[in-house]
Image: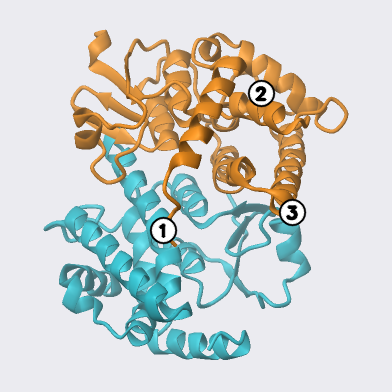
Chain colours: A cyan, B orange
Amino acid sequence: MAHEVVLLDFWPSMFGMRVRVALAEKGIKYEYKEEDLRNKSPLLLKMNPIHKKIPVLIHNGKPVCESLVIVQYIDEVWKDKNPFLPSDPYHKAHSRFWADFIEQKVYDTARKIWATKGEEQEVAKKEFIETFKILEGELGEKPFFGGETFGFVDIALITFYSWFYTYETFGNFSIEAECPKIIAWAKRCMQKESVANSLPDQKKIYEFTVWMKKYFGMD
Amino acid sequence: MAKNDVKVLGAWPSPYVMRPRIALNIKSVNYEFLEETFGSKSELLLQSNLVHKKIPVLIHGDKPICESMIIVEYIDEVWTSGPSILPSDPYDRAIQRFWAAYVDEKWFAAMKGLRSAQGEERKAFLDQVIEGLALLEEAFGKCSKGKAFFGRDRIGLLDIAFGSFLAWLKVTEKVNGVKLLDEAKTPGLVKWAERFCADAAVKSVMPETEKLLEFSKFLAAKMKGAPPPKN
């Protein structure tokens, strides 16, 4: 079956990165299209009229939206290589639960670390550390959240790693000091080509955030 | 399988709790419904859902599964002899999951906002709710392809996700004196809602509007008496 795969994305987006990692894990060739979110393309608006957001995967002309929905879709279509989810329903539900936990708990809190100051920032830092300590507990002694192999939960979380330097610099704290197992896990993931090639350099993300704060008058 | 091998921890007014119950009914699985008392959490709940401490929880044997839509997919994957809840085609599955996420994250968020908002803010939430229903009407046309449900011939994932909010939708209509599902604007959804609520898998777990309205008044009074939320 011929596959025409296009990804509408924005390079600093940890949600877009999830799809890049998933596509790389499956060895799928695709066309990457960078969106300027201040000036969204007609294609993006047509393919995601509901949210008008990236990432959007366009597979043989048909759009799939929402990063974790896309990752599951990729896993189900290209099912013969590197499965992301366990086959057993209970372990699958367990993986989905933790991906959902990440979805509920990480982004908004993390954003406040670089976007706010003072009391609000302190509260966000505290919540961020609490969340990652819970995740450390779930990881335990396993090499990956998926167990012996890199999987769905690892994909959901690892993309935030590219933003860690940004969080640490704006928040003036060390994630490694608070959650060493998470850093060890992240470095393990970064040894995979699919991850290393999909995540931008942490310093570049920081420079982007500095620029973005100035541009939107958030300083 | 013996009835006490499958338990659902929940509460009758919760749309999220309705979801696994509908799914179990579709699969003709007997289960024990353990009702939580409003305002307190049982030991079993706290032990089964250490992370969120929320209902619903499905306990299958000794294994807890949490988060309503994750539970529904689990039920579909375990009880394969019953009718399928998710379609088999990956693209159709992605569409159902996309809209289920939309219903939870965007549409019901606006419904909840409507409950406590006043004045201009209230009008803004109401507009969002109505806009959302227009989108869902269009989605219904595309998903159902002329059949009875979002899942086509049978109730599927998105029917369960959205349909579980119908009792609260009716309460919201009464409380706000508005028609949200409208024969003129959302004719497809009006008929779908009737079919959904009448379905054998749904009827026994969908609360009566009057009973839910009473509960909603009780809840509103409780919230007024509660201390102001921390900023």
Q: Are marks 1 and 3 on the same chain?
A: yes
Instruction: Indicate the secondary structure of the residue bearing disc 2.
Output: loop
Residue pictured at 66% horizontal, 23% vertical: B149
Q: Is residue A124 above or below residue A51?
A: below
Of helix, strand and loop, which one carries label 1?
loop
Which residue corresponds to mark 1? B230
Residue B149 badge: 2
Quadrant in the picture for the C terminus of chain B: bottom left
**Place of residue A76 in the rendered image (x, y in percent of width and height, measured from the top left):** 46, 44
- Horizontal and vertical percent for residue A203? 40, 89
**Which numbered disc flags the more N-terminal residue, 1 or 3?**
3
Which residue is nearer to you in this view: B204 or B30? Answer: B204
Type of amino acid at the residue the image marks with label 3: Glu
- Tell me which label, 1 or 2, sits earlier in the chain: 2
Name which quarter of the figure residue B156 lies in: top right
Q: Chain of mark 3?
A: B
Q: Which chain does the numbered disc 1 sit on?
A: B
Front tag of 1 and 2:
1
In percent of width and height, residue B51 lies at 27, 46
User: Which residue is labeled 3 in the image?
Assistant: B120
Residue at 47% x, 28% y: name it: B14
Q: Is residue A67 visible?
A: yes
